[in-house]
């Protein structure tokens, strides 16, 4: 019977050791508005959806386990009691202040943008962004861009009948553009324009797109 009491004592001591093991370290992402730091990323920060984010290791509090109670030695003629189950470690709640970066449609001024090839229309659009002072920086490599602009452009030149009967030699031009966040895929800007009887054709539609893009950035 003494051997039985010693075995029970070792079992409870082992259960107490397992219950006191620390919970695993978790990693959380903390973000803040990039404009609050003058649009400058810190050395350990990454641009996510227009916000500066960094990974932070968080050690959740270790739950306190109740001290193991010593069981009295079994008396002669008594049946050995059943050993209780080892108490489970309660799940730890996520620490306060941890945030998950949401999809953001706000366009960050000064961010980089890549204009996808659109049958030559991308050249007019790049020139229009500069002419209209749109606060974005065009780049030649999509992997370096925060935003990507894609679109379509259509130009209908005046036919011979229109030239002969009306004397008009101008064209009808239409264009549509979409700009999306390269990381989240969220569309942050969309615009379509249809110009009739234009003199400068694609230049006119590109400048219209750039004008409305600038207005949206300044509005937000």
Image (cartoon, grey):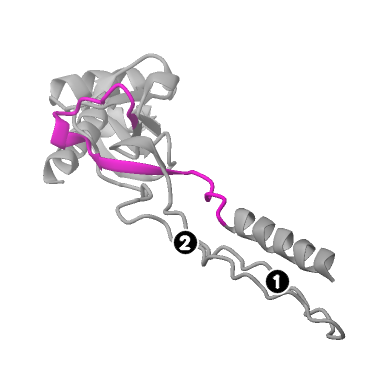
Q: Is residue 43 visible?
A: yes
Q: Is residue 120 left or right of residue 92?
A: left
Examine the rendering and report whether any part of residue 167 can be seen.
no
Magenta stretch: residue 41 in it? yes
- Among the 4 quarters of the image, the one containing residue 206: top left
What is the x, y in percent for residue 176?
35, 39
Residue 191 in the image, given as x and y percentages of width and height: 29, 43
Spot occupied by residue 170 in the image (x, y as percentages of width and height): 25, 27
CA gap between label 1 and label 2 equals 17 Å
Residue name at image x 63 percent, y 70 percent: 70
Crowding near the residue tagged with mark 1, few <14, some 14–19, many ≥20 C-alpha atoms within 10 Å = few
Q: Is residue 183 magenta?
A: no
Q: For this rendering, which residue is in front, 51 or 212?
A: 51
Task: State the residue lying farthest toward the top.
Answer: 140
First-in-chain label (1 vs 2)? 2
Q: Is residue 68 above or below residue 167?
A: below
Asked where in the image residue 140 lies, by quadrant, the reply is: top left
Q: Which residue is mark 2?
A: 64
Q: Which residue is the site of mark 1?
A: 85
Q: Nearer the viewer, residue 87 or 122?
A: 87
Q: Residue at x 83, y 64 (%)?
A: 3
Residue located 29% across and 28% down the image:
163
Answer with the quarter of the image where residue 124 lies: top left
Residue extent of the magenta highlight: 20-46
For the residue labelled by badge 1, is the local secondary structure a helix, a strand or a loop?
loop
**The N terminus lies in which quarter of the figure?**
bottom right
197 or 188, nearer to the observer = 188
Question: Left or right: where does residue 173 sit relative to residue 117?
Answer: left
Question: Which of these two is toward me, 12 or 199?
Answer: 12
Q: Position of residue 91 (x, y in %)?
A: 52, 63
* Helix, strand or loop at mark 2: loop
């Amino acid at each position: 019977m003494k051997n039985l009491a010693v075995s029970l004592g070792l079992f409870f001591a082992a259960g107490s050791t397992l219950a006191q093991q620390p919970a695993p370290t978790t990693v959380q992402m903390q973000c803040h508005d990039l404009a609050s730091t003058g649009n400058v990323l810190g050395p350990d920060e990454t641009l996510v959806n227009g916000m500066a984010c960094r990974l932070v290791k968080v050690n959740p509090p270790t739950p306190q386990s109740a001290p193991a109670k010593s069981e009295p030695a079994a008396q002669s003629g008594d049946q050995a009691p059943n050993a209780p189950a080892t108490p489970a470690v309660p799940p730890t709640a996520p620490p306060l202040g941890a945030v998950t970066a949401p999809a953001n449609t706000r366009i960050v001024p000064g961010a980089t943008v890549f204009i996808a090839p659109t049958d030559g229309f991308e050249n007019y659009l790049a020139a229009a962004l500069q002419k209209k002072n749109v606060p974005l920086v065009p780049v030649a490599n999509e992997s370096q861009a925060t935003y990507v602009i894609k679109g379509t452009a259509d130009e209908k030149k005046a036919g011979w009948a229109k030239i002969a009967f009306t004397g008009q030699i101008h064209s009808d031009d239409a264009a549509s553009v979409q700009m999306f966040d390269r990381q989240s895929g969220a569309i942050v800007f969309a615009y379509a324009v249809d110009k009739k009887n234009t003199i400068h054709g694609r230049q006119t539609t590109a400048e219209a797109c750039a004008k409305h893009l600038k207005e949206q950035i300044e509005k937000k």
